[in-house]
Amino acid sequence: MPDTGKLVLKSSKSLPKNEDPNKSVWKVLVVDDEPTVLDITRQVLRNVEFQGRRLELLFASSGAEAGKILESNDDVAVILLDVVMEDDHTGLKLAEYIRNELKNEYVRIILRTGQPGSAPERRVILDYDINDYREKTELTATKLTTSVISSIRDYDLITRLNRCLHGMEIVVSSICELMKIRSYQQFAEGLLTQLLALLNLHESGLYAHVSACAAEESDGDITILAGVGEFADPAYRDGSRSLPRRIVDLICRSVDEGRHLSVGDEFIGFIPSEKGGPNRILYLRDISGMEPMHRRVIETFLTNISIGFDTVVELERLRSQVDQV
């Protein structure tokens, strides 16, 4: 059986390793060598929340210090960056370092300057990957808060879109891997392996304890093909242990309605047979907090995998006929 858990992605752009949509904070890095500016920024932003998540403020008084913080925090959403610190262009040098050396294209950089002439706005916007440019004198408490929230919103959208793209790349790679398998049982096992890879798009291990099974349904009878977590018990596959009635009812409902279902922390993926055979079902439990993006990726994956089941069934039928000759 091919190692279906090892996926090779073509994308060279990695997502923030620590980015977790269910964490409680947005990280904002404030870089300025004026203690008064740091204190005022802290006072203005300390109680700000967005989408139910508070801000975690990180502070640096030099470009070098900021660089070290960013090296160990790749999930910073916004940087409020002073231009003039160690020298007249410290802020611009740090911006270049963030984009070109750290390869961080997600963090939103708001350049703040008390000396506009040292970094003309037009040249900065054209020559550097800066997302906003503000003079310190114009940043009232309201404008500062608005600017930060707007930047967090942009960061959130960009990371969500890139996670979705990353997930679709895994879908394509997963389907290619699965189509190499010629055994029906191994195909079901490989399907679960790839599904868990899709669930764990983040390195946070958010879905590390999911229980899941791949099953067939025909006229209300359910056969377990493969399982992980609780459903890894061989008793499910040999028929000596049955699924709880509630799960059976959910699976039957999914089949009757011909669609995927989400109920609480459970997800039932419906995979119809294109050739009139048994319906295939993927049941997942303990997935509370699943993002809509995650669900769309999984549904896309399942929609495009039904032909794979039919293919391996046909191959096994042909192989059986050849063995009988």
Image: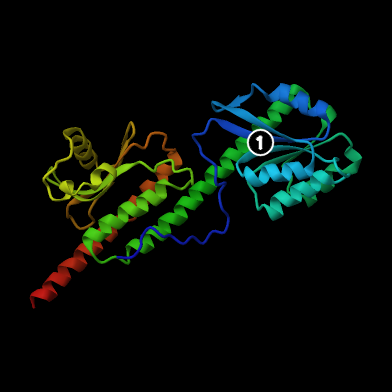
User: In the depicted view, which residue is nearer to us: 33 or 313?
Assistant: 33
Q: Which residue is mark 1?
A: 151
Which residue is found at the position 22% from the left and 59% from the top?
A: 185
Where, by quadrant of the figure, is residue 261 drawn? top left
Above or below: residue 223 compared with residue 290 = below
Relative side of 233 to 118, left or right? left
Relative side of 88 to 252, left or right? right
Where, by quadrant of the figure, is residue 209 drawn? top left
User: In the depicted view, which residue is nearer to us: 195 or 129?
Assistant: 195
Above or below: residue 7 compared with residue 23 = below
x, y percent for residue 238: 13, 50
Image quarter in which the N terminus is found: bottom left
Relative side of 158 to 180, left or right? right
Numbered disc 1: secondary structure: helix
Residue 79 showing in the rendered view = yes
Could you tell me the amino acid type at mark 1? Ser
Image quarter in which the C terminus is found: bottom left
User: In the depicted view, which residue is nearer to us: 256 or 88?
Assistant: 88
Which residue is found at the position 55% from the left and 28% from the top?
A: 51
x, y percent for residue 166: 49, 52
Where, by quadrant of the figure, is residue 289 drawn? top left
| Residue located farthest toward the bottom when viewing the structure as drawn | 325
x, y percent for residue 215: 21, 48
Q: How is the image coloured?
A: rainbow
Which residue is found at the position 67% from the left and 37% from the top?
A: 78
Q: How many marks?
A: 1
| Residue located farthest toward the right when viewing the structure as drawn | 117
User: In the depicted view, which residue is nearer to us: 86 or 307?
Assistant: 86
Above or below: residue 24 compared with residue 183 = above
